[in-house]
Image (cartoon, rainbow, N blue to C red):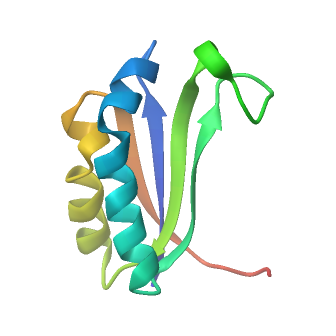
Amino acid sequence: MLYAIISDDVEDSLQKRLSVRPEHVKRLEALKDEGRLILAGPHPAIDSDNPGDAGFSGSLIVAEFESLEAAQRWADADPYVAAGVYSQVRVKPFKRVLP
């Protein structure tokens, strides 16, 4: 089943994000290589593809996991969690309708 992992950043998270981004992306690449990643990306803090110093306000990942518990375990192990980038992470079942 698909799950949405919806994360909110702490204030001024940009430097924390940058410090662990390679490890974060590596985990996403592994999901992609397994054919389980539907989409992933950050929410810019301003209305721009490249928010610069404004940074990001959170992230969204939609991926396939065997259960809600497995998705939660994966989300809890994210390097952004360990680095204090996220103030909150929610994991919810997701039903893909389109495309």
Image-based side of 40 in relation to 70, left or right: right
- Front residue of 22/99: it is 22
Question: Residue 67, located in which quarter of the rendered image?
Answer: bottom left
Q: Where is residue 87 in the image (x, y as percent from the top left)?
A: 35, 28
Q: Give the number of callouts.
A: 0
Identify the residue at horizontal 25%, vertical 63% (top origin).
74
Position of 71 with respect to 38 (left or right) is left
Q: Is residue 4 left or right of residue 88?
A: right
Foreground: 83 or 26?
A: 26
Question: Where 11 sits versus 44, above or below?
Answer: above
Image position, residue 98 (x, y; %): 79, 80
Quadrant the N terminus occupies: bottom left
Q: Quadrant of residue 27?
A: bottom left
Q: In this view, does 13 lie above or below 90?
A: above
Residue in front for this viewpoint, 65 or 17: 17
Percent from the top left, x then y, of residue 36? 45, 82
Of 93 and 53, which appears nearest the observer? 53
Q: Residue at x 47, y 73 (%)?
A: 63
Report the residue at 66% width, 79% height from top: 96
**Location of residue 98 with respect to 54 vertically, above or below:** below
Quarter occupied by residue 20: top left
Relative placement, left or right, of 11 versus 39 is: left
Q: Quadrant of the C terminus?
A: bottom right
Location of residue 94 in the rendering, given as x and y in whole percent from the top left corner = 55, 72
Residue beneath the point at 76% across and 36% down: 49
